[in-house]
Image (cartoon, rainbow, N blue to C red):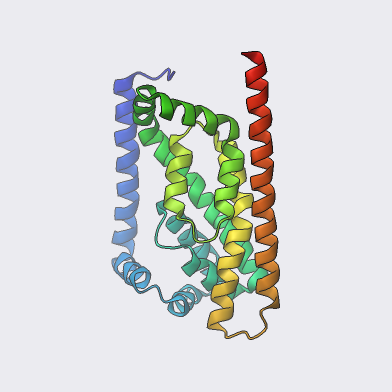
Amino acid sequence: MSLVPKASMGMVKVGAAAAIVLLVLIIHLANPAFFPHLCGLLARGDITETAEYIQSFGGWAVVFSFLLTLFVNALGFPPAIIFSTANTLIFGIFWGIFLSVVAETVGVALSFVLLRFFFRDAAERVIAKHKTLANIDKYSGKRGFVVMLIARMVPYFPSILLNALGALSAMSMRDYVIASFVGKFPSTGIEAIIGHDTITRQEDPTRLIVVVVLAVLLIVGAWWYEKKAAKKMAAQENRTV
């Protein structure tokens, strides 16, 4: 239970929302063309154009790419593949994927903090009224790490959905961040390599095949571990009843 009075917490949330709006306003005033150009870029979804735009920042390209990838993943849209692929075109396969995974993890962690801060209380009130939701919430606290890990490993899975599920569940932030970081390597790797090799017209599919096989093995292994652990936990609970 929160030690902060509801009225005070409400003021804190209003202040936090105002701070976010103020930050957006400051960026707009500093560079009025930034948001319109960025929105147009995202709407077109042109990966090559995105890569060229990031490169136009010269020595700051890494920082800008990191912040842009972070921002998009915090929102949960548009698809992160646009930026992870652009990063591989600019910085190479290894460093492009590494940069993307780190930035994406920071982005989804920020989303987790904001969504939980603003909406977890409301979610708890709804959950308390439904036994099924309460059981799911309890399960997410115990087994949420593996579930989130498996979900993050799956390529093209909507990030915005996982962000919301993680934040509004009983999962700890530590489990959420670690599961997201580890899980994003195979999914981001597959998405980025497919995009990179398609744009650069790579004819040798060996690299992609290896990454896909490794990702499938990781997903199947994690799924098997989760099923086994869930059965073990259920058996222990039955013995204690």
Rendered position, 53 above or below 180: below
Residue 204 locus on image (x, y percent) = 67, 83
Q: Quadrant of the N terminus?
A: top left
Horizontal relation, residue 137 to residue 124: left or right: right
Rendered position, 218 above or below 51: above
Q: Quadrant of the C terminus?
A: top right
Quadrant assignment, res 144? top right
At 67% from the left and 67% from the top, the residue drawn is 211
Q: Residue furthest top?
A: 241
Question: Is 236 or 154 nearer to us in this picture?
Answer: 236
Horizontal relation, residue 78 to residue 228: left or right: left
At 28% from the left and 66% from the top, the residue drawn is 32
At 47% from the left and 69% from the top, the residue drawn is 82
Residue 164 locus on image (x, y percent) = 42, 43
Quadrant assignment, res 30? bottom left
Rendered position, 135 above or below 190: above
Question: Is 135 or 99 nearer to us in this picture?
Answer: 135
Quadrant assignment, res 186? bottom right
At 41% from the left and 40% from the top, the residue drawn is 114
Residue 167 locus on image (x, y percent) = 46, 38
Rendered position, 227 above or below 153: above
